[in-house]
Image (cartoon, rainbow, N blue to C red):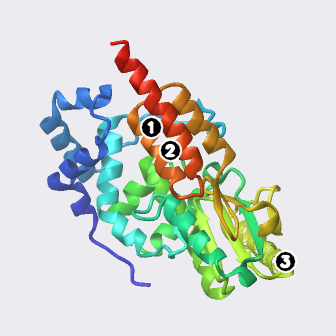
Amino acid sequence: MRRINNLYRSICSIENLNLADQKARRGKSKQIGIKQHDQNREENILALHEMLINKSFETSEYKTFIIFEPKQREIYRLPYYPDRIVHHAVMNILEPIWMSLFTADTYSCIKGRGVHKAAKNVQKALKNAPETMYCLKLDISKFYPSIDHSIMKVIIRKKIKDVDLLWLLDSIIDSAAGLPIGNYLSQYMANLYLTYFDHWLKEHLRVKYYFRYCDDLVILSGSKPYLHEILASIKDYLASKLKLKVKDNYQVFPVSDRGIDFVGYKMYHTHTLLRKSIKQSFARAVAKGKGKESIAAYTGWAKHANCLNLIKVLSHESNQKVQRVRNTT
């Protein structure tokens, strides 16, 4: 594999930092950190440029908080300036390089390969019923917190040899245990951490029907014993190569019995339903009179499943609520 050099100057350039600033603020222009940055925007960008060139940049102190949906997780947050701008500046240059390493079976945080694309490709595979009778469903225990820094750095160095860029990436990696959930860079590094595992599954084990969304994995086959063999190989690879552990709640089951619960959908050979928790969230959003964007997001989700009646009922309720509000104003 050819290793790439001479990237750091492009990352540090004023032009790239300005572009990173534009991208990092999208949809967040009212945040106080952005407003504070904008009071001295040009001076801040110049100062950040100097920090990176002189290698005096240090990751700021994290603030953490707990979220409970869809499950309890600790989220890390960095200041908008300078950290979030730096992360976007790095990915402006590294994104096409890292994307070229990912297999076609990898989803999450990849342009054009979100939940709907993942669901669509699983649905497409299920049309071949004889070869997809059984499903191996698993996820990785405490994936982000368990990522080993030394291994992460070795993986990055398989493609990148720019010592200045490696200094910056190493300093960001070492700023918190594992990979901090909430960092813009973390979602890309998480995919990169598993990318050689993906290639091993596809190219060495020759797994035909494989789908990974972050740390959620689905493998389909016409043979239940084969899936148990693959599971044993996966456990061994993750433990020995990446210091990761498969959660104990893994399942090998007939698709016709329970469907595949993956990326918010419940998928069968004949039809696809929304996951129960998504339907409940959709109904709550309508009941609470959430805005058009929220309702539209759930409607878009439902349109990729066999949920026409659900869409009609909840859209009707939403329209009635809007009309009642208009009548009282």
Query: Residue 250's spot in the image, x, y percent?
Result: 80, 60
Residue ID at (39%, 24%)? 323
Q: Is residue 231 left or right of residue 320?
A: right
Residue ID at (47%, 67%)? 156
| Residue type marked 1 | Ser
At numbered mark 2, what does the secondary structure look like: helix, strand or loop? helix
Query: Residue 159's spot in the image, x, y percent?
Result: 43, 75
Q: Which residue is the site of mark 2? A: 298
Query: Residue 320's spot in the image, x, y percent?
Result: 46, 28
Comparing 298 with 112, the one in front is 298
Of the numbered discs in the image, which one, if any, rests on residue 294? 1
- Rounded to the nearest whole Å, what is the CA distance between mark 3 and mark 2? 35 Å
Q: Is residue 259 something that shows in the picture? A: yes
Q: Marks 1 and 2: CB-CB under 8 Å?
A: yes
Q: Which residue is the site of mark 3? A: 224
Mark 1 or 3: in front is 1
Comparing 75 with 149, the one in front is 75
Q: Is residue 298 above or below residue 225?
A: above
Q: Is residue 64 something that shows in the picture? A: no
Comparing 70 with 154, the one in front is 70
At numbered mark 1, what does the secondary structure look like: helix, strand or loop? helix
| Residue type marked 2 | Tyr
Query: Residue 225's spot in the image, x, y percent?
Result: 86, 80
Question: Which picture quadrant has residue 97?
Answer: bottom left
